[in-house]
Amino acid sequence: MSISLVVNTSARQDSFFWQLMSRPTTAIAAVLLGLIVVSAALAPWLAPFNPGQLAIIHRLKAPDLLHIMGTDELGRDVFSRILFAGQTSLSVGISVVVFTSITGVLLGLLAGYFRALDAPLSRLIDAMMAFPDILLAIALVAALGPSSTNVVIALGIVYTPRMARVIRASTLVIRELPYVEAAKALAVPTPVILYRHILRNLTSPLLVQCTFIFANAILAEAGLTFLGVGVSPDIPTWGTMISQGRQYMDQASWIMLFPGLAIVITVLSLQLLGDGLRDLLDPRLAKGA
């Protein structure tokens, strides 16, 4: 019996993976995102130069065989800096997703399951969503101070209401299902109901929302850094590279072009992957297709 269960579970997982990869756009997005993540993780071994190595004699050098993406205003290799900058940008995005998942799921579960908490928590969520994302993030980072940690905290606070709203809506539906009512009638402890019967059934919307928040967090981090209120300028990020290269845009466009392409490809891949997951995990969309 246990062997059969393991085989069936493995088969379902394989089937889900191949269904997801059978969509051309989703498969391409997954491959591109995987290449970006692997390249950033292996940056110390893939980068041909030290990202902080100065070579003034080679400043603003156009792309060639030695520097495939050119050099910046201080002679630093742009390709090497993009690889190392990817570590910071992706780590900020992942940290924001973790922060948002914990706080958003907690608020959403409390608001959706406990009727007495629904109104005050919903008003709090609505009040936070009333502020434009970038303006609220700028205000929070300005109050906390520019650093990677504070950027994660600020963006986590900004995107928590989005996650909480999705989790609350799903919880409101699940709490009325017969098996949850049966668990209540059998006096099953509330934490057990929340974890075993509700949280486990929120995997699909949670996973899809995480991909979108990941993409938005990378964009927001780049925007904050470009405005000078994000990560410290001495730490290479894609936003930092664009900000530092804007004054040389006329004579060395590659300084801004390649970091911008890295952001565009990463965000687009995440969005397409999220769309593919949503279409596959949502029964209504799958039935319509």
Image (cartoon, helix red, strand yellow):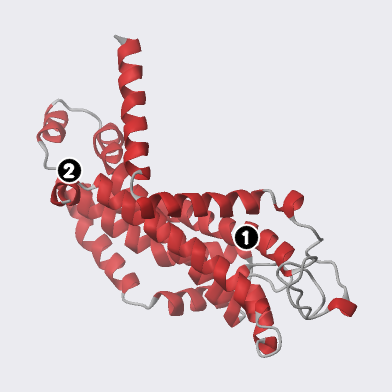
Q: Quadrant of residue 158?
A: bottom left
Give above or below for 267 relative to 195.
below
Q: Is residue 104 visible?
A: no
- Closer to the eye: label 1 or 2: 1
Q: 68 or 111: which is nearer to us?
A: 68
Q: In the figure, is residue 182 to the left or right of 245? A: left
Residue 212 image point, x, y percent: 39, 59
Give above or below for 77 relative to 84.
below
Q: Which residue is mark 1?
A: 86
Residue 168 image point, x, y percent: 24, 53
> How far separated are the C-alphas under marks 1 and 2?
39 Å
Circle 1/circle 2 CB separation < 8 Å:
no
Q: Residue furthest top?
A: 1
Q: Of the two numbered discs 1 and 2 on the same chain, state the one appearing first in sequence.
A: 1
Q: Secondary structure at mark 2?
A: helix
Q: Residue furthest front?
A: 65
Q: Secondary structure at mark 1?
A: helix
Q: In the figure, is residue 57 to the left or right of 267? A: right
Q: Which residue is mark 2?
A: 174
Q: Amino acid at mark 1?
A: Gly
Q: Amino acid at mark 2?
A: Ile
Q: In the rendered image, which quarter contains the N terminus?
A: top left
Q: 160 or 27: which is nearer to us?
A: 27
* Mark 2 closeness class: few <14, some 14–19, many ≥20 residues within 10 Å: many
Q: Which mark is residue 135?
A: none
Give above or below for 189 relative to 233.
above
Q: Residue at x 9, y 34 (%)?
A: 178
* Mark 1 closeness class: few <14, some 14–19, many ≥20 residues within 10 Å: many
Q: Quadrant of residue 25?
A: bottom left
Q: 23 or 184: which is nearer to us?
A: 23
Q: In the figure, is residue 115 to the left or right of 74? A: left
Q: 241 or 127: which is nearer to us?
A: 241
